[in-house]
Image: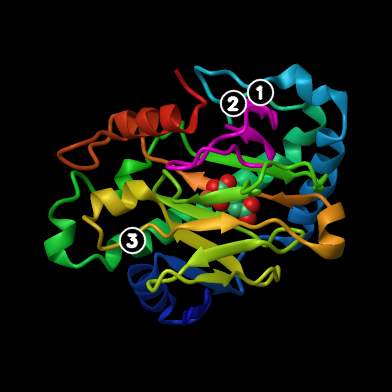
Amino acid sequence: MNVRVVDYRAADAAEQFTRSLHETGFGVLVNHPIPQQLVENIYRDWLAFFGSEQKHDFAFSVEKQDGYFSPEISETAKGHTQKDIKEYFHIYPWGRIPAQLQADAMRYYDTANALARELLAWVEQYTPADIAQHYSEPLSNMITGSQKTLLRVLRYPPLTGQEPAGSLRAAAHGDINLLTILPAANEPGLQVQDMNGNWVDVPCDFGMLIINIGDMLCEASRGYYPSTQHRVVNPSGEGASKSRVSLPLFLHPRDEVVLSERYTAGEYLNERLRELGVKM
Ligand SMILES: O=C(O)CCC(=O)C(=O)O
Ligand SMILES: [Fe+2]
């Protein structure tokens, strides 16, 4: 796969970047505005939280979807039968969060959310007119006042060797939302699928920020922006004894936004959460 690496500060960044999203569902930005030190602090502090008993005080709410999802709850990717090998915490500005982790998490949320909004505006600007005419409202409008944009902190525990055959840290899936922003994790393992079905390693270098299209934007753009399948594979050797932490921000529209003739965003999300086994 020929992934285009785009300089966020280049004069033609919006055009180059949206071309990559159209061709592969996936983009890589360098010289991006996400501060590395903040992300490293978040990784360190949340590793300590996942290692503590405090996490059990924040058991996730089925209705609201905020809080801590244990490895026993962990999602089963659409079309798969094994649960992923992971635990995670869902952060919303209105949701529950441990007091000692709140300031950095919200600083990151605001920074990543602002960038995601800017990138969605690029996507909108470079949507061909015959596709854009089907958007029920401008993309940038779809997220105005949204309460659903979600920051997920993931921890993949060290492997024990007792994992069920065939289970992965994260089985192949497409993200549900409009657009996802993913800084480099502390360990490798993320792969994306190219147009020929091959799995390609994603660089785990902080300078490279990964952005991918989610299923909602694929639906709204009638496939012009494809949602890329991706997964997190199990490490072997030394990596197997280490935790992996990652920090995707999932940009979501308001529930009532019409994505297509088939779905509003709220209907689409609820259907997918039921399939993942985390909602009734
Ligand atoms: O951990 C990663 O690198 C990716 C996580 C992911 O794809 C997800 O949570 O949707
Ligand atoms: Fe994902």
| Secondary element at tag 2 | loop
Q: Alpha-carbon neighbours of circle 2 within 10 Å: few (<14), some, or many (≥20)?
A: many
Tag 3 or tag 2, which sits nearer the N-term? 2
Image quarter (top left, top right, bottom left or bottom right) of the C terminus: top left
Please say if the residues under marks 1 and 2 sit with CB atoms less than 8 Å apart: yes
Q: Alpha-carbon neighbours of circle 3 within 10 Å: few (<14), some, or many (≥20)?
A: many
Under mark 3, the amino acid is Pro
| Secondary element at tag 3 | loop
Task: List x then y, in percent, for residue 206.
Answer: 70, 68
Colouring mode (rainbow / by chain / secondary structure / one colour): rainbow
Q: Is residue 21 left or right of residue 236?
A: left
Task: Please give the range of residues in magenta.
Answer: 67-92
> CA separation, marks 1 and 2?
7 Å
> CA separation, marks 2 and 3?
28 Å
Per the image, the residue denoted by label 3 is: 226
Query: At 59% from the left edge and 26% from the top edge, which residue is drawn?
Result: 66
User: Which numbered tag is attached to residue 66?
Assistant: 2
Query: At 39% from the left edge and 70% from the top edge, which residue is drawn?
Result: 24
In this orientation, does residue 146 appear?
A: yes
Per the image, the residue denoted by label 1 is: 96
> CA separation, marks 1 and 3?
33 Å
Q: Can you tell which of label 2 and label 3 is closer to the viewer? A: 3
Under mark 2, the amino acid is Asp
User: Which numbered tag is attached to residue 147?
Assistant: none
Residue 74 lies in magenta, yes or no? yes
Tag 3 or tag 1, which sits nearer the N-term? 1
Task: List x then y, in percent, for residue 79.
Answer: 43, 42
Q: Is mark 3 within 8 Å of ligand 2?
A: no
Main secondary structure of the magenta stretch: loop
Q: Quadrant of residue 72?
A: top right
Task: List x then y, in percent, for residue 263.
Answer: 23, 35
Residue 61 lies in magenta, yes or no? no
